[in-house]
Image: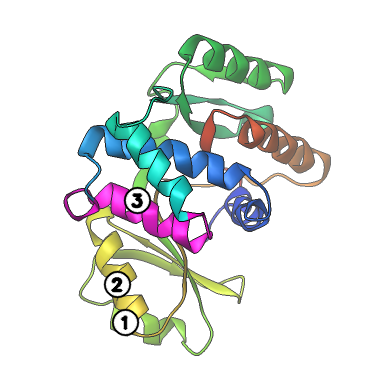
Amino acid sequence: MAGHSKWANIKHKKAAADKKRGKAFTRLSKEISVAARHGGGDQAGNPRLRHLVEKARDLNMPLDTITRAIKRGTGELPGVHYESQMYEGYGPHGIAVIVETLTDNKNRTVADIRSIFSRAGGNLAEGGAVNWMFKHLGVVRAQGAGFTEDQLLERLIEFDVKDIDSSDHTMFIITCDPKSLEPIKQELTSNGIKIESAELEWVADNHIALEGTEAEKAIEFLDQLEEHDDVQNVYTNLG
């Protein structure tokens, strides 16, 4: 599982660019509302909500925007009722894809997602057709200055770390058991290491390598999925 997909790296850079646009705020607002609806508006008793609020603050989301999103979730303010849905399929040149969405209209969303797959020469598949090729794991991206991979592993030895990847020389990508995600985040922060992101992700067991125009077509397809208003996350085995 060492090494992360080309799309994962592109996606992370796109997320940084999203900070300059409204899309990141829109996605987080949806997630905050859903987390508050399912677990209540008290961050102390709702770890998922607390994590999302921390993420929103890191993105400099205004406090009143965060508060409104929470109140829409708890019903204190009127708002749209979003439901989560995961789609699986095969994109151009056989790449496996998982798409996570939050939507107020599942019929509209599935029609749009199916259309994006079809136009790219892929196909939307039944649930379970793809996710067996992935594992749902914690993924922490942290700035790597001042630490070697061995030094970082030594600090995280007591946690269930699956892999540490520093191949891009700008940050560490730590893959771990989902239960270790929050403890690892806290350990890194206590050692003065800046966390770029810490999320549960679908991580491919193996990757498909594409080059040239094939890779360009696959990335264009993934980009179209990512840009859809209802799409929260896109995962693939594109290497």
Report the side of 210 relative to 177 (left or right): right
Q: Is residue 108 above or below residue 32?
A: above
Amino acid, disc 3:
Leu
Label 3 sits on a secondary structure element that is strand
Few, some or many residues within 10 Å of mark 3 (<14, 14–19, 20+): many
Q: In terms of depth relative to the viewer, which is nearer, 151 or 41?
A: 41
Tag 3–tag 1 contact (CB < 8 Å): no
- Residue 204 visible? The answer is no
Where residue 149 sits, quadrant-wise, is bottom left
- Side of 209 where 233 appears, left or right: left
The residue tagged 3 is 137
Q: Position of residue 52 (x, y in %)?
A: 38, 51
Q: Camera-side residue: 28 or 191?
A: 28
Which residue is the site of mark 1? 190
**Residue that mark 2 sits on:** 186
Q: Which residues are magenta?
A: 43-62
Q: Secondary structure at mark 2?
A: helix
